[in-house]
Amino acid sequence: MVKKYENNSKVLDLRHSMEEKIHEKLNRNKIGEWIAGDSGVANMLFNVTEWKKSIPIIMNILNREGLLKNSLIMKRLNTAGDDWNNEIIYPIEYDGIFNQM
């Protein structure tokens, strides 16, 4: 999740900025790309070919922007094309709930 802002356009601008930064870095390393975003809960979706290499890149960007501590990083468990089950990668100890798409 992102920091709370009174103005939703600021949240959307922040999400777009993060999507661009993450996409650029993943694309430059030829391990992924941005595919979609959900403005309702500020989800950012990326298709990565090497998720173990992508996680430190994503975490570094979020940390630099002061957003990591408020973020959940998940990977999709591809059991079927229309299945949106996820596994939480960060934070490891997270035991709350999250909005699956």
Image (cartoon, helix red, strand yellow):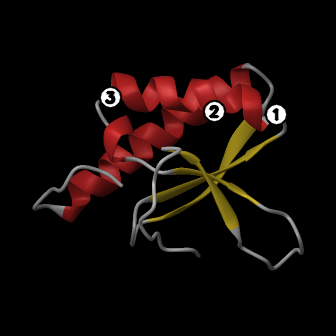
Q: CA distance from mark 2 to mark 3?
A: 16 Å
Residue named by callout 3:
65
Tell me if label 3 and label 1 are in contact, CB under 8 Å: no
Tell me if label 2 and label 3 are in contact, CB under 8 Å: no
Q: Position of residue 23 (x, y in %)?
A: 61, 35
Mark 2 neighbour density, 10 Å: few (under 14) some (14–19) many (20 or more): some
Q: Position of residue 53 (x, y in %)?
A: 73, 26
Mark 3 neighbour density, 10 Å: few (under 14) some (14–19) many (20 or more): few
Callout 1 amino acid: Glu
Label 1 element class? loop
Callout 2 amino acid: Ile
* Vertical arrangement, residue 7 with respect to residue 74, above or below: below
Residue named by callout 2:
55
Residue plotted at (56% across, 74% down): 100
Residue named by callout 1:
50
Callout 3 amino acid: Glu
Q: CA distance from mark 3 to mark 1?
A: 23 Å
* Vertical arrangement, residue 60 with respect to residue 4, above or below: above
Q: In what quadrant of the picture does the N terminus appear? A: bottom left
Q: Is residue 6 left or right of residue 95?
A: left
Q: Nearer the viewer, residue 21 or 98?
A: 98
Q: Is residue 29 left or right of residue 5?
A: right
Q: Position of residue 19 (x, y in %)?
A: 51, 42
* Vertical arrangement, residue 95 with respect to residue 40, above or below: above
